[in-house]
Structures are given as structure tokens and as C-alpha cells.
């Protein structure tokens, strides 16, 4: 059996997406899958050394690893009209945010790239994504950049939304916002990469066809959210673009990288050759 290690986040949307592969509902003949669960910034760092055969990475990290890894057509995390948000204890005018200390989930995250595209280079501190609301509540940062389920639970923590990066992206581009992708190591070869992509696509479709069991599993990684919130969150980010990037998904990636190049945040366009 060939062992393929897959890195993904311990979050409801990734758990939902990989449920069928985790539980043997989908399999690849001759391949044994091992799952490694880590936060996305840790996976971004692992990808730099090519440690894992398959991994989730932030779209912002992909250009730096594109020589070693190839995009998978399934598995993308994209939002249409929503995405990372900036929250604070009280409202701030956008012009003042450039001077506020902002807690971010990592330098390699797409959320941080979007923040830089919107605000330039405000002072930041790196905080584990699930601790950002607490850090803002306690005043260790003026504002916090939220990803994952915090985007829909922040109000319960007494925080106010001060900037919606997903909404801004869709208003200015008309495209979905690319946040995360899955990639395969290029030295696996086209045949194996294709098999892995089709297995992931089948797993995503299985979860959509069996939402109750897949959401029940995803709730293990929901950090206390209820079933309704979990269901809402996973369907925000495990959508049609997750099944296949399609033309619109590819254009969204191209637009993100083009904007980053124009701002001097990226040297050149990476290859967009999903399989």
C-alpha cells in the first residue's frame, strides 16, 4: 500500500469535506490515506519543505510553493460575498484602522494578504486563529482578523464588525473570494495526482449527499458551535467551487494574484494548472 499523507485543518468545513475519506466511504485502490490535522498556518509552513504528499494551504501561500506543489481542482475554499472580517470592541473608521494593532492568524494566510491589499501594512501580531476573539476582548489588540466559524459567531462575544473583506472583494471583482486550496506534490506524477483529486471530489459529493452524518462528524471540530451554526458554516465554504474550481474559480485566483503583483506583494504570477 502506498501511504499518502493529507494535511488539513481541524475545522468544521475541512472535516465535512474529508469525512468520506476519513471513514472509508471513498477509497483509492492500493493507497492508504493518513490524515494530519493542523491549523492552516502550520500547514503553510510545512508546505515550504514539501513534507506532505497532499495538503491544504492558503491561496496566499501557494505562489511560494508552486514549484513543488500543483493545485487540485477540487477542495478549494471560496466565499461569494463573504470571507474574513475585521472585528473590534467598538466601531472604527476605516482610515484609522491603518494605525491600529491587528491580531492576524498568520503571515501566510490569505486573510492577511487581503488585509494588506485593503489597508497597506498596519501593525500586526500573530495569534492562533481561535484565540483572536479573546485577544481582542482583553485589549491585547485593537482589532482581530477572523477566519473560520468566528466569522458568524463574533457578535456573541460582544465584538463589532469593522471591515468585511469578503464583501469588499465581491463588490469590486464580482468573483468568489479564493481563500484556501488543496495541492498535491508534483513528484507524485499526473496519474496519482488525478486519482487523489477524483477521490477528494467524490468525498465532497458524498458529504453533500449525506449532510447529516457529515455535519455530525464536523461538529467535533466546531469548538462548541451548535448543529445549525455548523451546518451553515460548512455550506458557506464547501460549495460548488469546492467540487470544481471551474472557469470562475480560476479567474478568481488569477485576480487575487494579479492584484497582489500590482501592489508589490507578490513577485510574479504562479502557475494555475489544477488537476
Image: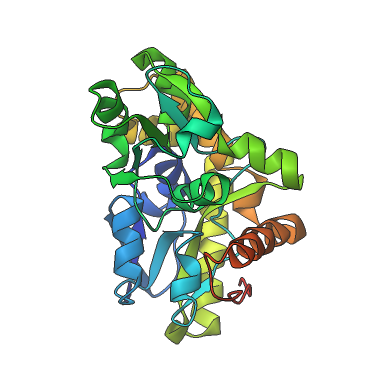
Which one is nearer the viewer's eye here, 98 or 245? 98
Based on the displayed image, in which of its 4 quarters is residue 198 positioned? Answer: bottom right
Residue 97, position as x, y percentages in the image: 46, 34
Residue 63, position as x, y percentages in the image: 50, 71
In the displayed structure, would residue 20 be above or below residue 144?
Answer: below
Which one is nearer the viewer's eye here, 5 or 87? 87
User: Is residue 221 something that shows in the picture?
Assistant: yes
Which one is nearer the viewer's eye here, 6 or 102? 102
Colour setup of the view: rainbow
Residue at coordinates 37% horizontally, 33% vertically from top-left? 144
Residue at coordinates 34% horizontally, 51% vertically from top-left? 106
Residue 9, position as x, y percentages in the image: 35, 49
Residue at coordinates 57% horizontally, 35% vertically from top-left? 236
In the image, 195: left or right of 254?
Answer: left
Q: Quadrant of the C terminus?
A: bottom right
Based on the displayed image, in which of its 4 quarters is residue 215 positioned? Answer: top left
User: Is residue 210 something that shows in the picture?
Assistant: no
- Number of labelled discs? 0
In the displayed structure, would residue 112 be above or below residue 144?
Answer: below
Q: Quadrant of the N terminus?
A: bottom left
Residue 16, position as x, y percentages in the image: 45, 41
Which one is nearer the viewer's eye here, 44 or 228? 44
In the image, 232: left or right of 68?
Answer: right
Amino acid at each position: 500500500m502506498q501511504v499518502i499523507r493529507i494535511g488539513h485543518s481541524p475545522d468544521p468545513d475541512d472535516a465535512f469535506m474529508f469525512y468520506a475519506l476519513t471513514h472509508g466511504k471513498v477509497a483509492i485502490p492500493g493507497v492508504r490515506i493518513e490524515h494530519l490535522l493542523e491549523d492552516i498556518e502550520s500547514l503553510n509552513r510545512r508546505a515550504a519543505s514539501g513534507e506532505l504528499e497532499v495538503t491544504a494551504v492558503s491561496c496566499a501561500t501557494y505562489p511560494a510553493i508552486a514549484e513543488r506543489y500543483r493545485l487540485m481542482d477540487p477542495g478549494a475554499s471560496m466565499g461569494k460575498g463573504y470571507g474574513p472580517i475585521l472585528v473590534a470592541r467598538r466601531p472604527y473608521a476605516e482610515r484609522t484602522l491603518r494605525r491600529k494593532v491587528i491580531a492576524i492568524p498568520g503571515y501566510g494566510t490569505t486573510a492577511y494578504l487581503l488585509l494588506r491589499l485593503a489597508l497597506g501594512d498596519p501593525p500586526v501580531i500573530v495569534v492562533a486563529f481561535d484565540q483572536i476573539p479573546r485577544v481582542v476582548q482583553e485589549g491585547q489588540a485593537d482589532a482581530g482578523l477572523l477566519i473560520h466559524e468566528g466569522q458568524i459567531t463574533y457578535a456573541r462575544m460582544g465584538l463589532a464588525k469593522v471591515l468585511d473583506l469578503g464583501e469588499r472583494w465581491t463588490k469590486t471583482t464580482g468573483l468568489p473570494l479564493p481563500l484556501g486550496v488543496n495541492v498535491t506534490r508534483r513528484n507524485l506524477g499526473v496519474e496519482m495526482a488525478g486519482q487523489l483529486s477524483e477521490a477528494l471530489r467524490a468525498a465532497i459529493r458524498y458529504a453533500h449527499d449525506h449532510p447529516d452524518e457529515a455535519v455530525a462528524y464536523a461538529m467535533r471540530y466546531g469548538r462548541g458551535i451548535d448543529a445549525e451554526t455548523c451546518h451553515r458554516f460548512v455550506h458557506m465554504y464547501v460549495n460548488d467551487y469546492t467540487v470544481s474550481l471551474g472557469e470562475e474559480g480560476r479567474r478568481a485566483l488569477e485576480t487575487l494574484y494579479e492584484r497582489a503583483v500590482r501592489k508589490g506583494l507578490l513577485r510574479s504570477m504562479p502557475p494555475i494548472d489544477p488537476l
